[in-house]
Structure formats: structure tokens, C-alpha cells
Image (tube, rainbow, N blue to C red):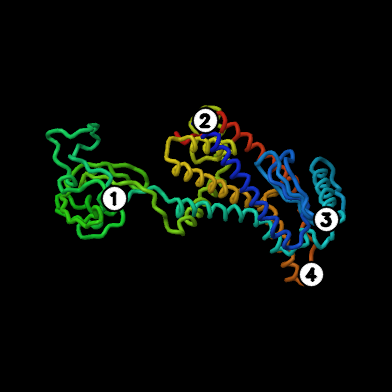
Amino acid sequence: MAVLAFVIGVLVVVIGLALSIALHEIGHLVPAKRFGVQTSRYMVGLGPVVWSKQIGETEYGVKLLPIGGYISMAGMYAPVRKKTRARGVLATLVQDARDANHETLVGVDDSRAFYRLPVWKRIVVMLGGPFMNLLLALVLFTVLYSGIGMNQTTTTIEAVSECVMPAGSAATECGEDDPPAPAYAAGLRPGDRLLSVGGTDVATFAEASKIIQANPGEPLSLEVMRDGVEVDLTITPVLAERELAAEDGTVTTQEVGFAGMTAAVARVQQPIWTGAEATVDGLGRVAGIILQLPVRLWDTAVDLFTGQERDPDGPLSVVGVGRLAGEVAAAEAPILDRVSAMVGLLASVNIALFVFNLIPLLPLDGGHVAIALWDGIKRAWARLRGAPEPAPADATRFVPVALLVVVLMIGMGALLFAADIFNPISIAG
């Protein structure tokens, strides 16, 4: 069963990734068609075509590998009629790009070419793809936090200790010399729901714990709901050493008020804006990873060849994401916990797609946005000087840079593939 669950987890991520890519390309396709650009192909995936269908002027299809996708638009770059004078590999690449761009314009109404669009429309088309990934991440995080809910302690009592044991004690039963726990002495029972402590209404167990910890030796009124009836009790916390966790994760031992009760954990739906907050937090984390990508890739390579444990917050390939999904699906945990983890994983993947595609380098979407902005700046400057409108920016000159980016992306992918196979990040640590 564990193997079957692992395979199902991998398939869920593969399908989720394919859908994310499909929506990304729809984000480009819809505004392109809306603005009248001729689009000849819409493809999800890379490699051999598995299925395709011609609808109007556009061929829609699915390819074998769900690791990419594209739409073909006429005139992605402004045509450049002149031949390059320089010789060499780079000049040949530029000229080949110009020739290929001309081919997309053969038999096409020039007014329907992408480069003919106003700058703002070109930006809308190119940002439409990443925007769909951002929107999908927002929806998934909202489903996760406000739909499924998050596990958190409640004001309902799960268990009551009969005695006070020393901090760090491994004993499982009370000894003769162990004093009775205040909660037990006060008459608290499992299933009671805390309403107020010391005359203060409490909405969370953390609020109740804070009052108890701050008042050792002081009798506190306790109002609980038991079987639908409000019950009044009195509890006197004892001073005891307990391990407390700070917000930064550090754990210290302190003498605080202690009652001897634990809270029940339940899924609680969060406010509707929590999904948006999680999306913003995810953007910050992924942006930080992208900014430090060369260093993180170097660390990944060192860990791969030395066998050291990898940074759990480091970059992953599709293989790594699929492996994590398989482990989540096969974990011995309630089904809802596993579903939650899968939803969060897919949301994080879409955050990564959004941020990565905004890098202002061709062939990424951010590179096309940068070209459009440069075009707009040139035109605005010409208008300010009263000069004739300049020719569109020659984006084909950046083809060597685009090729270098592709080579680096292939190298990065190969490194992360190897690391995720031979030195994987595991949810088990």
C-alpha cells in the first residue's frame, strides 16, 4: 500500500504541474487572441506530441514531458531585414533567429504580429502566464488555510495529568511523592472547553497558558463548558520548571506557573485573507532563493559529491518535488493531513513558476517584458525630443544571451536532477 500511495502522490504532482503549465500558457493565449495576435500553436509539455487538435487557426496539443509549454505567436520580434556583417557563431545565431522570425510572418497580416501591439498590451500578454501561476497559488493557499484548515491547539482539554512530574522526566506514572496536578485537583476533565481563566475570556489555549504561567501560587477562577453546561472551577498553578519555545524556535527551561493539562488539536479554518498572506510570504521566500541561486546551486553540488545533508529549503527539480509528494502520500498520517501537504506543495510550485518567469532575461517571460519596456522608453524619449518614432527594438541581438540562459538552465536542471536522485531532500529529514 505504501508503494501505491507513493506512486499516487507522484502522479498527483505530475498532473498538478501539467495543469499549472497549461494555465500558464492560457494566461498568454487568451490576451494574445483578445488583442488579435495570430497564434498558431498552444502546447503543454515538451518532446513528442501525444495529442493535438486544430481549432480555427490554432493547433492545441499535449506533449510527452510535463516540464514546459509554449504558444507560437506571429512576429514575436520585430523583423530586421539587414544581414549581420559580423562573422562567427554568435552572428550566425542572430541571423538564424531573424530568419526564423521572418518565417512566422509569412502569409500573416502584419497588423496581427505580436511586435505590432502597443507596449502595454505586449506586457499584458507576457505577464499573463506568470499571473495565472500566482492566481493558482493564491487559490490553493486559500483552499488550504480557509477551506481545509490548519491543525492548531484548541481550548478543549485533551488530557489532564494526575500529578506534577519534574521537567524532562521519563516516568509514565505518578510516584508517591509527586504532588497532584492543579488541573486534576481543580476537577478539570478531558473534553472540557475553556471559556475564561482568572476572569479573562480566552479564545485560544495559548492565551489560557499565558495567564496560568504568569500566576504561580495564585488561585484563578476557571469557567469551562462541560456537556453543554457552564461549570465554575478554581485552579491554583504551581511553580515548576518547564521547557518553553520562543518565536525564533529556541527552547529554554524556565520556572513558570503550571496546571498539568494539554489541549486537543483540531483543524481550524483560518480567515479568508490568510491565503493571500501565505502567498506573499511564499513570494519572499522564493525570491530569496532566486537571488541566492548561484550560491545555493554550489552548495547543492558540494552536498551531492560529499554526501552531506542538503538544505531542506534549497532548490528542487521536478524529480525532487515528485519524490516529496510521494513521501507525503505514503506517510502514516491522516488522509486530510496528506491532502493538505500536497495542496501546499502545489501552491509552492506555482509560486516558484511565477517568480522564476519574471527574471528579466530571454527566453523567460520577464525578458520579453524587458524588451517591451525598452521599446516603450525609446518611443517616449523620441516623443520628448520631437524626433521620429524609432524602429522597434531588435530583440534578436539578445539571442546569444538567451542561448546562454538556456544552457545554464539545462545545467541547473541536470545538477538538481542528480541531487534529487542520489542525495534527495526527505520529509523525514
Choose mark 4 or mark 3, whichever is in front: 3
Q: Earlier in the sequence, mark 2 or mark 4?
A: 2
Q: Which residue is mark 3?
A: 79
Q: Nearer the viewer, residue 298 or 219?
A: 219
Image point 29% across, 52% down: which residue? 155
SS under mark 1: strand
Real-space CA distance between mark 1 and mark 4, rounded to the nearest whole angstrom: 74 Å
x, y percent for residue 232: 17, 56
Q: In the drawing, what numbered circle is on residue 387? A: 4
SS under mark 4: loop
- Label 1, residues with CA under 10 Å away: few <14, some 14-19, many ≥20: many
Q: What amino acid is at disc 4?
A: Ala
Question: Can residue 308 be seen by looking at this rendering?
Answer: yes
Q: Quadrant of residue 387?
A: bottom right
x, y percent for residue 30: 69, 58
Q: Which residue is mark 2?
A: 3
Real-space CA distance between mark 2 and mark 4, rounded to the nearest whole angstrom: 69 Å
- Label 2, residues with CA under 10 Å away: few <14, some 14-19, many ≥20: few
Q: Quadrant of residue 377?
A: bottom right
Q: Which residue is mark 1?
A: 156
Mark 1 vs 4: CB contact within 8 A: no
Q: Earlier in the sequence, mark 1 or mark 4?
A: 1
| Up-down relation of residue 376 to residue 359 (above or below) | below
Choose mark 2 or mark 3, whichever is in front: 2
Q: Nearer the viewer, residue 317 or 295?
A: 317
Image point 23% across, 57% down: which residue? 196
| Up-down relation of residue 114 to residue 83 (above or below) | below
Q: Nearer the viewer, residue 265 or 229?
A: 229
SS under mark 2: helix
Question: Can residue 311 be seen by looking at this rendering?
Answer: no
Q: Earlier in the sequence, mark 3 or mark 1?
A: 3
